[in-house]
RNA sequence: GUGGGUGUAGCUCAGGGGUAGAGCAUCGGUUUGUGGUUCCGAGGGUCGCGGGUUCAAAUCCCGUCAUCCACCCCA
């Protein structure tokens, strides 16, 4: 019995940040809380979709779809049923848009603000910050092309990082232009690579064939080509002014950014704005959050022309960036620990435990009747905030002794006053 | 898919052909109405798995799997 390669168990008290339940849950709580502050609402779609959702949504030539998806057929009566092919979702946006159209969300609200949180699956070689099952939190704003919404989701992204006390990150933005300019740019990139064929290796020539835009980043960083076509040369006036407006708004709101003209994304649906937030502390998988505008995806799914912006954040990558101080703050503790001095008080102790739980408290009690000191030591170890002590006197008089483990102060009172004594 | 590093106790790691080790953690005692410290003790291992060499393999050789890192790709 073994865990599948690239998959993780998440369990209590794990020493690894990406495998610890309490750390995972508090991070989840914080980031979903921020999304709610911006009035985004949760959408939960299935983990499995028809493969088509992703091939048309993400693009069949992308690496994600062509070699990283978990695709499968069903077995029916011992036979492979090839009538439909399913995929574990490799990302969130395609399914959200599928659902948006299928559930006619556009009829209820002009603008839909959705967030999701959940596992994604990609068959890749595992590495630091890269797992075959990983969690993404994503934001999708569907139904407007207003630049202020672009600003709003970028600030949401930064808000998340700040609330997780993550420092040392860089926001990179770029405009890749609309569909027409992207086509023109692709043509020019192909022309350029044909002229420089001898200097480019065969793997990269394959990439150009599939998706010319993905070569742009390499052209500068890997080959040092100076005269490679740039996205900005092909932008029309609308795209240019949109990008200018956004940078003005970011400047005005003191959001630091870097314009990266080579920034393109590995998913086909983007247009105009693309952005990434990177951290230098993660090694080679340094993108913690990425997104952009995608105005043509709804149409591609046979919906009506609908403008959208969104991003997705890698939860495990966020976890890897948490500081030790931050992690220590979310360490679990127990609210109450009920200690009894003699085994014959165990029923009474259970009675008190039950009352506290009824009041909504988190209570631990040693049912194995270890020694008084042992119980108190254990209460201390699991960081109980308060301890209820039941000894001879308390048992006889139907009282309890409530001890605050931080201040050390104790208070004796009748059991009937329990609910008023604790808040 | 390609290359490299590492697999010994729950964790971090030492050992390097002849009885399996340390620190931390866990549990018990020190402490029969008061925790965090100290001291003492206990449990826990097919030395990743399979094969080979050898009187003898955790140790040497081959294979394999896992994991980490990088390429690639991405969140």
Image: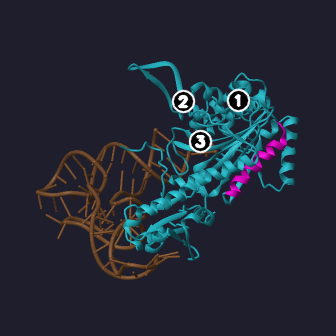
Q: Marks 3 and 1: same chain?
A: yes
> What colouring style does the render use?
by chain
Look at chain B in the picture and name its colour: brown
Is residue A326 a member of the stretch shown in magenta? no
The quarter holding residue A63 reads top right
Instruction: Tell which subunit mark 2 falls on.
Output: A
Residue at image x 51%, y 42%?
A: A132
Pick the residue in front: A243 or A398. A398
Residue at image x 57%, y 50%?
A: A316
The quarter holding residue A75 reads top left
Residue at image x 59%, y 76%?
A: A407
Alpha-carbon span between mark 2 and mark 1:
19 Å
Residue for badge 3? A118
Q: Earlier in the sequence, mark 2 or mark 1?
A: 2
| Magenta region, residue range | A145-163
Alpha-carbon span between mark 3 and mark 1:
18 Å
Q: Earlier in the sequence, mark 3 or mark 1?
A: 1
| Main secondary structure of the magenta stretch | helix
Residue for badge 2? A87
Q: Secondary structure at mark 1?
A: helix
Q: Which chain is cyan?
A: A
Alpha-carbon span between mark 2 and mark 3:
15 Å
């Amino acid at each position: 019995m073994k865990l599948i390669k690239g998959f993780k168990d998440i369990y209590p008290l794990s020493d690894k940040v990406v495998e610890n339940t309490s750390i995972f849950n508090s991070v989840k709580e914080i980031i979903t809380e921020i999304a709610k502050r911006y009035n985004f609402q949760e959408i939960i779609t299935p983990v499995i979709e028809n493969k088509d959702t992703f091939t048309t949504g993400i693009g069949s030539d992308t690496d994600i779809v062509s070699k990283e998806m978990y695709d499968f057929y069903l077995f029916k009566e011992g036979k492979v049923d090839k009538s439909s092919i399913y995929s574990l979702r490799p990302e969130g946006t395609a399914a959200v848009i599928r659902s948006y159209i299928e559930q006619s969300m556009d009829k209820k609200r002009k603008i839909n603000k959705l967030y999701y949180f959940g596992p994604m699956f990609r068959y890749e070689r595992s590495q630091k910050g890269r797992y075959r099952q990983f969690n993404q939190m994503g934001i999708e704003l569907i139904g407007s092309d207003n630049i202020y919404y672009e600003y709003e989701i970028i600030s949401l992204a930064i808000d998340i990082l700040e609330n997780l006390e993550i420092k040392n990150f860089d926001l990179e933005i770029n405009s890749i232009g609309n569909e027409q300019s992207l086509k023109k740019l692709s043509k020019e990139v192909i022309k350029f690579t044909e002229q420089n064929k001898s200097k480019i290796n065969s793997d990269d020539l394959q990439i150009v064939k599939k998706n010319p835009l993905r070569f742009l980043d390499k052209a500068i960083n890997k080959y040092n080509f100076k005269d490679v076509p740039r996205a900005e040369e092909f932008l029309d006036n609308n795209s240019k002014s949109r990008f200018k407006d956004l940078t003005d708004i970011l400047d005005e709101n003191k959001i630091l950014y870097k314009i990266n003209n080579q920034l393109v994304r590995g998913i086909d649906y983007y247009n105009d704005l693309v952005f990434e937030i990177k951290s230098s502390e993660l090694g080679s998988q340094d993108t913690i959050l990425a997104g952009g505008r995608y105005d043509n995806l709804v149409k591609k799914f046979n919906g009506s022309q609908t403008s959208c912006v969104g991003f997705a954040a890698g939860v495990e990558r966020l976890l890897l960036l948490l500081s030790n101080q931050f992690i220590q703050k979310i360490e679990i503790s127990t609210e109450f620990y009920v200690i009894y001095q003699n085994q014959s008080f165990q029923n009474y102790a259970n009675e008190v435990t039950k009352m506290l739980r009824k009041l909504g408290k988190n209570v631990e009690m040693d049912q194995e009747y270890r020694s008084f000191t042992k119980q108190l030591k254990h209460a201390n170890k699991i960081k109980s905030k308060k301890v209820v002590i039941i000894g001879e006197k308390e048992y006889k008089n139907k009282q309890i002794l409530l001890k605050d483990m931080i201040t050390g102060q104790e208070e004796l009172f009748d059991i009937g006053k329990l609910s008023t004594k604790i808040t």
